[in-house]
Amino acid sequence: MDLSLSTRNEGDRTIVAVGGEIDVYTAPKLREQLIDLVSNGSYHIVVDLEGVEFLDSTGLGVLVGGLKRVRAHDGSLRLVCTQERILKIFRITGLTKVFPIHPSVDEAVAARD
Amino acid sequence: MDLSLSTRNEGDRTIVAVGGEIDVYTAPKLREQLIDLVSNGSYHIVVDLEGVEFLDSTGLGVLVGGLKRVRAHDGSLRLVCTQERILKIFRITGLTKVFPIHPSVDEAVAARD
Amino acid sequence: MATVRLQISATPAHVRTARLVATAVARRSGVADSALDEIRLAVGEACSRAVSLHEEFAPHELITLLLADQGTFVVTVRDMGPTGAEARHIDPLEGFDGLGVPETFFAGNGGRMPAGFGLALIGGLVDDVEIDPAGDGPGTVVRMSWPLG
Amino acid sequence: MATVRLQISATPAHVRTARLVATAVARRSGVADSALDEIRLAVGEACSRAVSLHEEFAPHELITLLLADQGTFVVTVRDMGPTGAEARHIDPLEGFDGLGVPETFFAGNGGRMPAGFGLALIGGLVDDVEIDPAGDGPGTVVRMSWPLG
Ligand SMILES: Nc1ncnc2c1ncn2[C@@H]1O[C@H](COP(=O)(O)OP(=O)(O)O)[C@@H](O)[C@H]1O
Ligand SMILES: Nc1ncnc2c1ncn2[C@@H]1O[C@H](COP(=O)(O)OP(=O)(O)O)[C@@H](O)[C@H]1O
């Protein structure tokens, strides 16, 4: 299934809700979206992965790239995920140490370092 | 998707409701069902194809085989189908001339030659 | 989108694999949604026929399905059955009384359709079909194509 | 259930074709439902990696996926990339600081994962994996297996 992206703001946080499959085929679309946001001054991004059905290493790479970009502006990139099969991929790759992962968008939006 | 079969009687008519895909992989199951019915004395069979998602020539062969069997006992085999893509297959193969095809189970059950 | 080549052993279950792949690749290649049912059925028929032939004549050989985007969406199914035995399959209508007089069925073998019935169905369904001996060895090539969006 | 062989050209869209086929055949072969997500991901990773290598080194060659029921469900993905360049891919952890110190990412190239990351993920995910040079030509073979129900 194709990737769906929808973006909204809450205060200075920008929430990107992702649906479908983030893989080698669709990841470029998410990459562009994150680059656009940062270019337009959104440095605090919450990526909501609850609608994601599939995530591969290309998708992880895009999230890491996004994190790198917001960090260059002292920003943050937080994830929302409660799906065990997606969380497992972050655990296996050690990326749970890199990304703050929250159980809900509200908690991710409220979180501060 | 696998084949599902459910059988019930109305008077001297036996209705076989088929669901899923009737193809080279599943057709043997339908063939056995029809053979069983005829062996057990059901000679007036209505095959309800409304739940069928896919039908190929193996499936047609099984229906023709069933018709042959009930005819040997002066019986009947009627079909219920309103799905255009399934009807098309009967038309292309000329089998609309062989099978009485009805728009509902009620009409098929009520029909007499 | 470029080439996909699928080879399956002669098993009815793999006819489903072939249908699944052909339909998914066709959709992604830009074939109209309205043609997908036709592709699913035609590919299934071509592969079912190949599986039957292989079961009888070449049980250990693979059947090859080629999906290619060549301006149109081209599907080729190639079996490894004997082309001699294939002669009777080449004319889809042969042995089938022109698809119009199906009483011949009832003389048949327990409801199995006459040889060539699957090809006849493909012929009635698909506008662009060619059926030829493979040339480079045993077997027959069924070549079908559909327009791309 | 016997063999399926799928060959795809080096296109990201066909990684989806490969995932679809591997998952469907695995299910039908009797692999436990709980393993299907793992197979989908592992096959996707192996093929994504192969596509990247082919895009760079062998754009016109096909990538081969073999699915076989050999007591276990065995998936082999074979690329045609140079095995010389492959050396750095063989150790999944190399260049990745042991998967535990991911600050190395941030020195990287715009968020692309380091070479070998896909294989590292496969290694972390699948119990039975072997990664070897093909032997009979260029390329690498990633061989993975899962128990059958
Ligand atoms: N080659 C493929 N073509 C179409 N669907 C595929 C393919 N491979 C896998 N799929 C799966 O089939 C489902 C439907 O995908 P589809 O609607 O064709 O994708 P999209 O619209 O994103 O191109 C998805 O779950 C997808 O993963
Ligand atoms: N080789 C295959 N394995 C599984 N599903 C397939 C395969 N080929 C096609 N499909 C399609 O995938 C869908 C799900 O089928 P599935 O549930 O696996 O079938 P079943 O349970 O009947 O074996 C169906 O629409 C089916 O046509």
Image (tube, coloured by chain):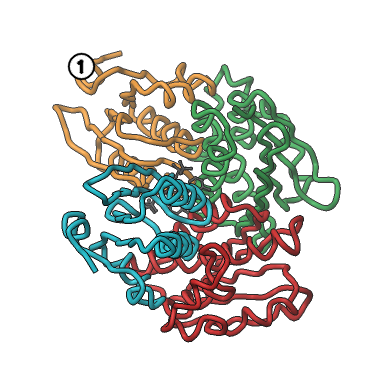
Chain colours: A orange, B cyan, C red, D green
Determine which residue is flagged by label 1: A110
Q: Quadrant of residue D124?
A: top right
Task: Give how far across and how far down residue D3 sits, in percent.
Answer: 68, 48
Task: Give how far across and how far down residue D95 sits, in percent.
Answer: 65, 29
Give the vertical position of C110 relative to D72 (above or below). below
Task: Give how far across and how far down residue A35 sits, in percent.
Answer: 35, 43
Q: Residues within 10 Å of mark 1 (few under 14, many from 20)?
A: few
Q: Is residue C28 visible?
A: no
Residue type (three-letter) at the residue carrying disc 1: Ala
Q: Quadrant of residue C140?
A: bottom right
In the image, what residue occupies the spot 71% across and 78% down? C134
State the residue in front, D131 or C89: C89
Task: Give how far across and how far down residue B87 sits, in percent.
Answer: 30, 68
Callout 1: SS? helix
Q: Is residue D149 visible?
A: yes
Give the vertical position of D27 relative to A50 (above or below). below
In the image, what residue occupies the spot 65% across and 57% down? C7
* Chain letter of the residue carrying label 1: A
Give the vertical position of D37 relative to D137 (above or below). above
The image quadrant where one finds the C terminus of chain A is top left
In the image, what residue occupies the spot 62% across and 82% down? C90
Residue lying furthest right in this view?
D136
In the image, what residue occupies the spot 80% across and 42% down? D133
State the residue in front, D99 or A36: D99
Q: Quadrant of residue C138?
A: bottom right
State the residue in front, B49 or C102: C102
Residue lying furthest left in this view?
A11
Q: Is residue C44 left or right of residue C35?
A: right
Q: Is residue B48 left or right of residue B70?
A: left
